[in-house]
Image: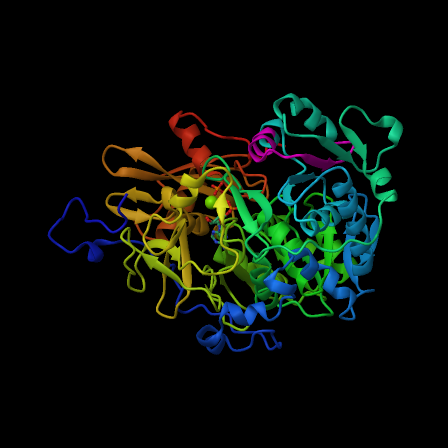
């Protein structure tokens, strides 16, 4: 598909003039100014012009000969920089039980497990997967695996058998670390996993162990607390993580120890972590945000992290912020939309005065949510853009820059992002095109596990890493997300991104969530069809649907409103909370649904 193409009804004018998409109304006018707090990065322009990744490497501890280990940077180095007895991790169980672990305690626990893994034959490069809820052992295991040079494979604890089989089979995992409640899921597929040698079970008695199982506590009890980190080549693999599966079958992305340079610098600039912060990343480490910004990045800066085992619950989340006095909070649009749906009263019933910095990632953040955040939290929500493949944030609303609600922000220092056509030519400000990045940032994926051709697809636009997303850039260098390249709708010769229509829909008080697709239409090529979830039990009616359409027409334009609206109880989402538009489309058109292993079907 060529993005910049001529209007089929009129081929006389140059293509670019015919390109049609909507600058969100008010995008230029609406600006949330920088807040008067001192940020780790105060002067974006200077840093953007002067920073190189070699400057970033100076903040990372290397071993002799340029060797490095991400786990050493996340944990070991804090034993000598004054943070030894600082709390590294607050874990809050689903029942509310609070536990604290210092950097020293994490260090010793990870050393024990690292030694135990070595003792059962795990070597550099072996894949060790972690299939646990958000308990301390999840964090300890990830560090232990990295320390001995094995490759960590995080798995979301809600995965079903298909998702587990795909990942464990494809990666040829040797070990899975799990718990008594989850281990049956592994045994159920064990016959399909010839490479899996051991299942290590936490919180279990020796007497309850069955075939292939080992007890975590027995293994570590015998192991020493002394372990030297494996000096790794910066290009040696650190973790193997599968993408969210929003657009198709998840890809097994390989990241390396050198990524820590990017984890560190972005946690410093974007998360803006300081020594007295209490930081809560709500993402599960089964997704890239939970691994990079729930473990390696914040720990590289020596920050105190919060891990909450429980599920989403608006009052419960606010209580947690109040109880632990969370200062920096990194979450996702889907959670923020659910919080907005839960209403303002529940916000005001809690004290959220500890919060100073709020961030969002994973999906487009609707401007309405940013405005609501300003109203109820008194803080702007900082959207940022990145992917499993990019391994770190690349485009962000930095705390030192003003925010334009609906924009993902600007490329970080050291990152050159652009909007190009299919030939890699950069487009003018305001033009819709492919979102690409110049390779060279430290955390770019190194390969797709056992799928080199897939890896090369990311580089099909010469000179660029292609993200698969469409976006545009304004004259001040802010980037605006339009949609996945495959999701862009072509209606009567106009290109419309699902995000802008969804954002207009959720602006309407009766709409809590919206997913928008293009539906084939003889006359118009495609028409816009919206699936919506009603807010606050509002009863749907024909009159209300007309009113919602009118609202979209007013906000967008006459051709960009949804001609069809269907009300649903919920929208299909991935386990990481992303709306699966491809599934809405398959349902609508009666087509095969494709890979559903990432579907959140609770
Ligand atoms: P798959 O690649 O398997 O289809 P996925 O792309 O959802 O799944 P992730 O790597 O978890 O897997 O997500 C990255 C994608 O999430 C981006 O390409 C983009 O489409 C979307 N995304 C992330 N952050 C933002 C953001 N701030 N605004 C808009 N979209 C975002
Ligand atoms: Mg993707």
Q: Position of residue 188 (x, y in %)?
A: 68, 22
In the displayed structure image, the side of residue 169 where residue 425 appears, left or right: left
In which quadrant is the N terminus drawn?
Answer: top left
* Farthest-out residue, left: 12
* Vertical arrangement, residue 437 with respect to residue 171, above or below: below
In the displayed structure image, the side of residue 352 where residue 411 appears, left or right: left
Classify residue 522 by image quadrant: top left
* Residue 266 seen in the figure: yes
> Residue 379 colored magenta?
no
Q: Which colour style is shown?
A: rainbow
Closer to the camera, 88 or 211? 211
Q: Position of residue 485 (x, y in %)?
A: 37, 46
Magenta-tinted stretch: 165-181
Q: Residue at x 38, y 55 (%)?
A: 436
Closer to the camera, 370 or 344? 370
Count the marks: how many? 0
Closer to the camera, 518 or 127? 127
Q: Residue at x 20, y 58 (%)?
A: 17
């Amino acid at each position: 598909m060529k993005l910049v193409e001529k209007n089929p009804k009129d081929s006389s004018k140059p293509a670019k003039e015919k390109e049609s998409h909507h600058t969100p109304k008010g995008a230029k006018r609406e600006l949330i100014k920088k807040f008067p707090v001192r940020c780790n990065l105060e002067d974006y322009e200077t840093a953007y012009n002067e920073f190189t990744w070699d400057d970033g490497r100076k903040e990372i501890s290397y071993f002799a000969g340029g060797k490095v280990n991400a786990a050493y940077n996340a944990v070991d180095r804090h034993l000598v920089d004054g943070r030894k007895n600082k709390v590294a991790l607050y874990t809050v169980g689903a029942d509310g039980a609070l536990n604290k672990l210092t950097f020293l305690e994490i260090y010793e626990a990870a050393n024990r497990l690292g030694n135990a893994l070595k003792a059962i034959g795990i070597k550099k490069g072996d894949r060790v997967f972690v299939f646990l809820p958000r308990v301390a052992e999840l964090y300890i295991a990830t560090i232990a695996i990295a320390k001995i040079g094995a490759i960590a494979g995080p798995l979301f604890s809600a995965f079903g058998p298909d998702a587990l089989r795909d990942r464990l089979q494809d990666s040829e995992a040797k070990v899975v670390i799990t718990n008594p409640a989850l281990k049956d899921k592994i045994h159920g597929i064990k016959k399909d996993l010839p490479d899996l040698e051991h299942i290590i079970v936490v919180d279990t008695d020796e007497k309850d162990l069955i075939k292939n199982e080992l007890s975590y506590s027995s293994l570590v009890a015998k192991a020493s607390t002394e372990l030297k980190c494996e000096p790794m080549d910066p290009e040696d693999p650190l973790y193997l993580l599968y993408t969210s599966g929003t657009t198709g079958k998840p890809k097994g992305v390989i990241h390396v120890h050198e990524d820590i340079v990017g984890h560190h610098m972005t946690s410093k600039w974007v998360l803006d972590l300081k020594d007295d912060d209490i930081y809560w990343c709500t993402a599960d480490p089964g997704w890239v945000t939970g691994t990079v910004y729930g473990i390696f990045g914040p720990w590289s800066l020596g920050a105190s992290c919060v891990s909450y085992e429980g599920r989403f619950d608006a009052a419960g989340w606010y209580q947690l912020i109040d109880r632990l006095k969370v200062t920096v909070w990194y979450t996702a649009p889907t959670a923020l939309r659910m919080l907005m749906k839960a209403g303002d009263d529940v916000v005001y019933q809690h004290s959220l005065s500890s919060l100073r910095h709020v961030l969002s990632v994973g999906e487009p953040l609707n401007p309405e949510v940013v405005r609501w955040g300003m109203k109820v939290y008194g803080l702007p929500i900082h959207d940022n853009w990145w992917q499993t493949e990019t391994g770190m944030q690349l485009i962000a609303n930095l705390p030192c820059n003003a925010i334009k609600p609906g924009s993902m922000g600007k490329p970080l220092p050291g990152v050159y992002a652009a909007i190009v056509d299919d030939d890699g030519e950069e487009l003018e400000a305001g033009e819709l095109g492919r979102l690409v990045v110049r390779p060279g940032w430290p955390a770019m994926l190194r390969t797709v596990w056992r799928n080199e051709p897939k890896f090369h697809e990311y580089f099909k636009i010469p000179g660029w890493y292609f993200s698969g997303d469409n976006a545009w850039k304004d004259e001040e260098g802010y980037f605006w997300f339009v949609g996945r390249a495959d999701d862009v709708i072509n209606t009567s010769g106009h290109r419309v991104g699902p995000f802008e229509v969804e954002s207009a829909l959720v602006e309407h008080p009766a709409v809590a969530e919206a997913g928008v697709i293009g539906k084939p239409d003889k006359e118009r090529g495609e028409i816009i069809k919206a699936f919506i979830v009603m807010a606050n039990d509002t009863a749907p009616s024909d009159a209300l649907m007309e009113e919602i359409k009118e609202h979209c027409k007013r906000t967008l334009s006459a051709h960009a409103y949804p001609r069809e609206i269907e009300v649903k109880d919920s929208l299909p989402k991935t386990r990481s909370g992303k709306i699966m538009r491809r599934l809405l489309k398959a349902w609508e058109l009666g087509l095969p649904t494709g890979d559903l292993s990432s579907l959140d079907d609770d």
